[in-house]
Amino acid sequence: MKRTLALILLLTTSTILCSSPDSIKTILEVGPEGKGNSKAAEAWSKITENADVNSLIMVFDAMDKAGPIASNWLRSAAEVIAKNLEKSGQTAIDPLGEYFMDQSHPPKARRFAFELIKKNEPITAKALIPGLLNDPSPELRRDAISSLIDQASSLKKEGKKSAAILIYRQALNAAVEENQVNPISKSLKELGIEVDLPKHFGFLMRWNVIGPFDNTERKGFETIFPPEEEINFSAKYKGKEKETEWVSLASSDSLGKIDLNKPFGMLKETTAYAYTEFESKSSRTAELRLGCKNAWKIWVNGKYIFGRDEYHRGQRIDQYKLNIQLKEGKNTILVKACQNEQTEEWTVQWEFQLRVCDESGVAILASNRKPTPQSEKQSRRPRRSKS
C-alpha cells in the first residue's frame, strides 16, 4: 500500500513538472487587449495547483523573459505558490535567495523575491537591507535609502547636525528616484547644504535652440526642417512667419526643464529644435531619459532614436527611457518638440527635460559639463501669441 502511494505521489509530481513548462509558455504568449487571457487563466490554474518549490523557481525564471502582462500573471502565480508552501510548512528561502542575489535578473522580479523573503524571514531580510544601498536595481535600493533617511532624521532631531549631514549625503549618493531625492535635498537644505539637483540627476541644462517652424494641422512632426539635415549655427532659415536662427538657452530649473516658451513666446502649432553636445569619457551604453508632454523626436550622433506624436498626456521625470550608445569624445543630441493647436491653460507648456544616466538611473556626467545655471527670479509668462 505504501509503495502504491509513493508511486502515485511520484507520478503526480512528474505530471506537475511536465505540465509547468507548457503552462508557462502559454502565459508568456499572452498579449495586449486580452489576447490569450483565457488560455493564460487555464495555464495559471495548472501551475498553481499542487505546486512545489521547483515550480516556484520555474515561475521566477520565466519572469526573465516575460512582458508586462505576462509578468503580472507570473507574479500572481508565484504569490499563490509561496502562500501554499508556507501553509504546508515548506520554505523556499534558499532558491529565492539565489534568485534575488543574482543581479542579472529583472529588477522588479528580484524585488518581488525579496518581498517573499521578507514576509517569511523578516530578520534575514532586515540584515540584507544595508547591503542593497548600491544595488543596480532602484527597486531594491529603496529600503536601504529609507533606513538612512530615518537615521539621519533622528540625528537631526537630536541636534547632531554634522552626523545627520553625512548620513543624508550617503543616502543621496545612492538615491535615483525623485520621491527620495527631493526629501533628502530638502532636509539637507534645512541643515545649510544646497544640493545641485540637475547635476545629481544628470539633466542637460545648456542648449542651442531654433524655431519656430510650422506645425499647422500637426504636420510638423513628419516634416523635415533644416536642423534635421544640418547643424549650422550661423545659418538662418525660413520659419513659420519669420526668419529663424539659433539662440542659446540655459535652464536653472531644479528638474532640468527646458522651456521653449522663453525664447519663442507662447506659440501654438509650432515646431522647434534643441541641440547640445555631450562629451563622454569613454565609449559605453547609456540611457536617455526624457519627460515631455509635447510631440517629440530625438537623434543621437545623427541617428534617429525614437519619437512620439502625442500631445499633453502629462509629463514626469523619466517618462521615456531610450537606450543609446555613447562614443568616446563628442556626442551630439538633437531634440525636436512640436506644440499643437490646443489653447486650454493646461496645454501652454512647450518644454522637455532630458538626462543621461546608466540603466539604474545613476547620472552619467559629461566631461564638458558646465556649472548648473544660477536660479532666476520667477517671472510671469508672456502672453500667448495668436500665431
Image: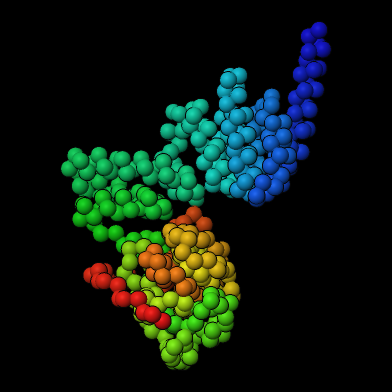
Give me the residue at 42% from left, 54% from top. Answer: 176
Specify whether residue 134 is in view: yes
What residue occupies the far left of the structure in this picture? 159
Q: Position of residue 51 (x, y in %)?
A: 68, 27
Count how many numbered circles sit on residues in the image: 0
In the visual, does 283 lie left or right of 55?
A: left
Q: Position of residue 364 (x, y in %)?
A: 45, 64
Give me the residue at 22% from left, 43% from top. Answer: 156
The picture quadrant where one finds residue 368 is bottom left
372 over 143 or under it: above or below:
below
154 over 338 or under it: above or below:
above
For the C terminus, the quadrant is bottom left
What residue occupies the far top of the structure in this picture? 1
344 over 139 or under it: above or below:
below
The picture quadrant where one finds residue 284 is bottom right
Q: Nearer the viewer, residue 377 or 175?
A: 377
Specify whether residue 204 is in view: no
Q: Position of residue 270 (x, y in %)?
A: 46, 78
In the visual, does 114 lie left or right of 193?
A: right
In the visual, does 170 lie left or right of 159?
A: right
Give me the residue at 21% from left, 52% from top. Answer: 190
For the N terminus, the quadrant is top right
Q: Position of residue 95 (x, y in %)?
A: 61, 33
